């Protein structure tokens, strides 16, 4: 069966350090891998997208890597701040059908706590 | 900045009652989705909608659920006869989808449904 696995244990780091979150998947051939941020009681917010033929993507303090051989993505936040504390969701988008439709499937998320 | 809006933010209902959750997607978006998140669990795909019809639905989306786009702006989720296990946060999302559909989803803030 298809699975997306993220570390369910919370990640606690000190302000200024780099946070690294892991996403592993099985039995998928996603066209795109995405990372979202979710704050308590709020909807997910899109952060970054990486295509299957890309190895790395950067946006400000965020970096995502995508290894389709290992079926793994790493999500890095450099110079972390307390405001980065949230749950980070890995998601895979698989296109199906002739209308270019598809669906986004989420992992369970990893909660990051950045301490001042 | 354009956003997805959802109403109501919270609805409490009795088991067996019908519920309609409403969403206004971003105006130029072509793909629409409903997701749900049971407290403490992951965000789960329910249904995708494109060109005025359902593109894909999950096993959760059984005959008790239906979706509709009654006019050019609203997108609704109806649960005909609510069960206790339908208690969850329901998120509406939309994506632009022009050209290549990358699946970058814009989520609303959710409607919390409590079934008593």
Image: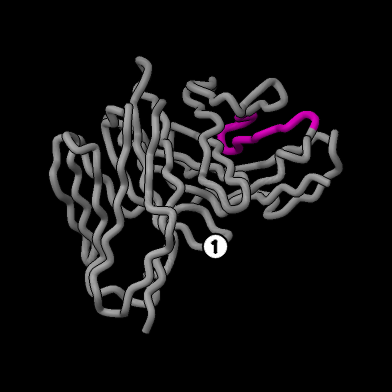
Q: Is A102 covered by the magenta stretch?
A: no
Using the image, determine if residue A35 lies above or below residue B69: below
Using the image, determine if residue B10 lies above or below residue B61: below
Whole-percent x and y of residue A93? 35, 34
Q: Is residue A68 left or right of residue B40?
A: left
Q: B73 and B25: which one is in front?
A: B25
Q: Residue furthest bottom?
A: A116
Give SS at disc 1: loop
Whole-percent x and y of residue B9? 68, 54
Residue beneath disc 1: A40
Q: Which residue occupies 68% across, 41% down? A: B21
Whole-percent x and y of residue B45? 51, 35
> Quadrant location of residue B105?
top left
Q: Which residue occupies 48% across, 21% down? A: B55
Q: Which residue occupies 71% across, 39% down? A: B86
Whole-percent x and y of residue B6? 61, 49
Chain letter of the residue carrying label 1: A
Mark 1, other Cα within 10 Å: few <14 / some 14–19 / many ≥20: few
Using the image, determine if residue A86 lies above or below residue A57: below
Q: Is residue B110 left or right of residue B16?
A: left
The tally of labels here is 1
Q: Is B70 covered by the magenta stretch?
A: yes
In the picture, the quarter occupied by the N terminus of chain B is: bottom left
Range of residues picked out in magenta = B68-81
Q: Which residue occupies 31% across, 79% down? A: A15
Q: Is residue B25 left or right of residue B79?
A: left
> Quadrant location of residue A104?
top left
């Amino acid at each position: 069966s298809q699975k997306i696995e993220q570390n369910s244990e919370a990640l606690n780091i000190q302000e200024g350090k780099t946070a690294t979150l892991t996403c592993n998947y099985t039995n998928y051939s996603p066209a795109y891998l995405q990372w979202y941020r979710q704050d308590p009681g709020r909807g997910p917010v899109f952060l970054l997208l990486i295509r299957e033929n890309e190895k790395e993507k950067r946006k400000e303090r965020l970096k995502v890597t995508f290894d389709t051989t290992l079926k793994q993505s790493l999500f890095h936040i450099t110079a972390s701040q307390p405001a980065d504390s949230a749950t980070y969701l890995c998601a895979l988008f698989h296109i199906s059908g002739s209308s270019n439709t598809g669906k986004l499937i989420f992992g369970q998320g990893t909660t990051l706590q950045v301490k001042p | 900045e354009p956003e997805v809006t959802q109403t109501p933010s919270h609805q409490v209902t009795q088991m067996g009652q019908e519920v309609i959750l409403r969403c206004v997607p971003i105006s130029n978006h072509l793909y629409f989705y409903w997701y749900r998140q049971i407290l403490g669990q992951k965000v789960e795909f329910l249904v995708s909608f494109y060109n005025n019809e359902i593109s894909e639905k999950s096993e959760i989306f059984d005959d008790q659920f239906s979706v509709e786009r009654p006019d050019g702006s609203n997108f609704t989720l109806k649960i005909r006869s609510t069960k206790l296990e339908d208690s969850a946060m329901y998120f509406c999302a939309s994506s632009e989808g022009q050209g290549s559909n990358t699946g970058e989803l814009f989520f609303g803030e959710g409607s919390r449904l409590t079934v008593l």
